[in-house]
Amino acid sequence: MINRRKALKSLATLPFIGSFLGANSLSANPSSAAIVSSVRRDFFKELGLRTFINAAGTYTSMTGSLMPKEVTDAISYGTTEYVNLDDLQDKVGERIAELLECEYATVSSGCFGAMSIGMAGILTGMDPEKVKQLPNTKGMKNEVIIQESHTIGYAQALTNVGAKVVKVKTTRDLEKAINKNTAMLWFLNAHTDQGAIKWEEFIALGKKYNIPTFIDCAADVPPVENLFKFTKMGFDLVSFSGGKGIRGPQSAGLLLGKRKYIEAARMHTPPRGETIGRGMKVNKEEVLGMLAALELYLQKDHKAEWAMWEAQIKLISDRALEIKGVETEVHVPKYANHVPSLRIRWDQSLVKITPSDVRDQLKDGHPSIQTVGDNSTVGITTWMMVPGQERIVAKRVSEILSSAT
């Protein structure tokens, strides 16, 4: 008779044994169900992938953030029942609007997806024939005005659906650029200080010419106040990433603002088929996960969390400063990724290693640690770490720098 240890070993080699046995077989044989549920596969190890401590931030290439258990519980719950997708988005949209004190909201496929469907909705309104027509914008207003300093690659979210970008530098340029084809004014919050036109004036220009305004706030949580700030300020549409500071699903985002524009944006999303946004599907599990993540984020003690980040950064900084020739700088980006962050630099005549080599040794070591930086610094943030990992990072940074003296 096979013993339990051998049974577990055998089951671990069967990737999807539950599907082979079937739900009825497992329910009929509780002992089999117990054995299957006790096996936790290490998928990344099976695939030959290294996991790492994230000391870099919420980069998509590094898979964003880790979701709290409350969020993964909501996602798991979503797998247990069927529900009408439009009804779910309606109810969750109303709930999010209530939480964030705005007119309406919807869960999107990331911030990029929010920008695309938001732009598409403004292009077509509620006209189903125009919805089918995109990205062909014949017969529609199709120009979106952007400050030149706000131009980034992610603006492709707008051009993908057929919009034409018009770049300006000053208020005078913007007003001269407005014509019968102007559909929207778009603002990048992360580049606020780089543009001549600031929030209030941008909104006022939109109202003056009756043109909707859209602000991209992808990485602008924290602070939590930003979730309320821009809709209250008067922007017609506001977008956020869901899988960064809010710690929802990496593939989800939020589109907030005026109901008429969000209802038009929804015309382009599944379950509707002949639309530009059909591939930007958000499933029921992601919708529930995003709602749970937002509720949890709003309930957080944000001051306590900030104090924890500051203490973690100080720990790493203090360890690095023990080494002669090392200097550190704690900074908080004003917009986007607004969290305590650390830059470490050193006199390379005393510490004979380059920042690039330090980053490589951190990445290639055990455990692997991902950081950022440039030719003169190593950059570290702690807000995406599991508490306690900052001690590992501090120790490894100290070891690598010390060994180069």
Image (cartoon, rainbow, N blue to C red):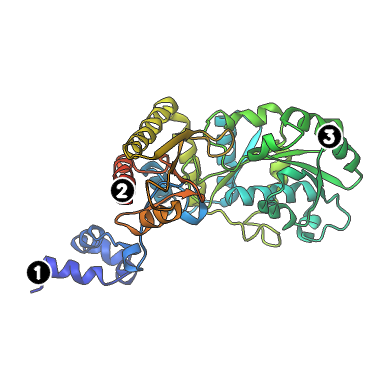
Q: Nearer the viewer, residue 25 or 314?
A: 314
Q: Position of residue 214 (x, y in %)?
A: 72, 40
Of badges 2 and 3, the one in the foreground is 2
Kindly report the distance in space between the C-alpha atoms of the residues bearing marks 1 and 3.
Answer: 77 Å
Q: Amino acid at mark 2?
A: Arg
Q: Is residue 152 above or below residue 323?
A: below
For residue 183, say whether it is visible. yes
Residue at horizontal 48 percent and vertical 54 percent from the top: 82
Q: Nearer the viewer, residue 180 or 376?
A: 376
Cβ atoms at labels 1 and 3 below 8 Å apart: no
**Numbered tag placed on residue 396 in the rendering:** 2
According to the image, label 1 marks what residue? Answer: 3
Quarter of the image containing the N terminus? bottom left
Looking at the rendered structure, the number of numbered marks drawn on it comes to: 3
Q: Position of residue 177 (x, y in %)?
A: 88, 43
Going from the N terminus, do you reach mark 2 or mark 1 first? 1
* Secondary structure beneath label 1: loop
Q: Residues within 10 Å of mark 1 (few under 14, many from 20)?
A: few
* Secondary structure beneath label 3: helix
* Secondary structure beneath label 2: helix
Kindly report the distance in space between the C-alpha atoms of the residues bearing marks 2 and 3.
Answer: 50 Å
